[in-house]
């Protein structure tokens, strides 16, 4: 990753830019986006990272060509693409455009542990768990209410789609273990 590359969050924050990339071919873009972060279709570790955009490029430039994750059926893709074609992408992307507000809204809680009963599950191949591994190691301090933590081997970002039965079991076991 070169220093001039842009992280996808920043790329999404400029109104209209990502929409211009995505909306002409929502179905193709979604397929590539899902494939880029799914364990069975993600690019090889030595391939350019799909979380970054090279100068003048698009996110799509780094999506695996011609791949669709095994969990993504044509019918599901029809529904997802159809809804984003109907509504546009702005609503979904606005979450990224409002992220800085979280820092302001949550400033009074900076450093405070989260004590509510909690569960963590992440994919072992997801950048969120690999890049944030130190934060996960700190959970005993930062999440003292953590009842259960799981890193799913050979799983990417879309854990609920990639491993639905396992995630359902983890959730129901966690719910059953909650203090009364």
Image: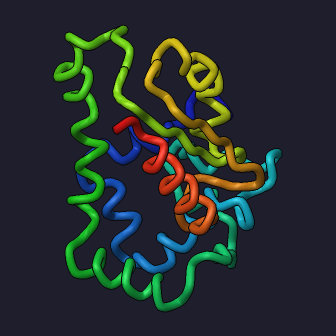
Image x and y of residue 138, in percent: 57, 16
Indicate the quadrant where residue 90 lies: bottom left
At 31% across and 43% down in the image, what residue appears? 96
Indicate the quadrant where residue 124 lies: top right
Between residue 20 and residue 149, name the one nearer to us: 149
Give above or below for 121 relative to 139.
below
Q: Residue furthest bottom?
A: 75
Image x and y of residue 46, in percent: 82, 45
Between residue 55 and residue 60, name the one nearer to us: 60
User: Can residue 91 be seen here?
Assistant: yes
Left or right: where does residue 167 sit relative to residue 81?
A: right
Give above or below for 145 relative to 63.
above
Left or right: where does residue 131 sit relative to residue 44?
A: left
Image x and y of residue 68, in percent: 64, 77
Q: Quadrant of the C terminus?
A: top left
At 48% across and 43% down in the image, what residue appears? 177
Q: Quadrant of the N terminus?
A: top right
Instruction: Report the colour scheme.
Output: rainbow
Between residue 125 and residue 33, name the one nearer to us: 125
Number of numbered callouts drawn: 0
Indicate the quadrant where residue 179 lies: top left
At 24% across and 71% down in the image, what residue appears? 88
User: Can residue 58 be seen here?
Assistant: no
Give above or below for 128 relative to 43.
above
Between residue 81 and residue 153, name the one nearer to us: 153
At 46% across and 16% down in the image, what residue appears? 142
Image x and y of residue 168, in percent: 53, 62
Left or right: where does residue 163 sit relative to residue 85?
A: right
């Amino acid at each position: 990753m070169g220093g001039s590359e842009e992280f996808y969050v920043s790329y999404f924050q400029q109104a209209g830019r990502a929409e211009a990339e995505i909306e002409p071919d929502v179905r193709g873009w979604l397929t590539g986006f899902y494939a880029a972060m799914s364990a069975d279709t993600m690019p090889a570790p030595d391939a350019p990272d799909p979380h970054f955009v090279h100068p003048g490029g698009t996110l799509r430039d780094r999506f695996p060509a011609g791949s669709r994750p095994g969990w993504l059926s044509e019918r599901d893709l029809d529904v997802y693409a159809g809804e984003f074609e109907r509504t546009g992408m702005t609503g979904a992307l606005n979450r990224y455009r409002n992220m800085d507000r979280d820092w302001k809204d949550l400033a009074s809680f900076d450093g405070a542990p989260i004590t509510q009963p909690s569960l963590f599950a992440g994919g072992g191949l997801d950048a969120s768990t690999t890049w944030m591994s130190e934060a996960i190691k700190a959970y005993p301090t930062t999440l003292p209410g953590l009842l259960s933590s799981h890193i799913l081997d050979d799983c990417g970002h879309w854990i609920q789609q990639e491993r639905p039965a396992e995630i359902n079991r983890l959730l129901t076991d966690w719910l059953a273990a909650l203090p009364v």
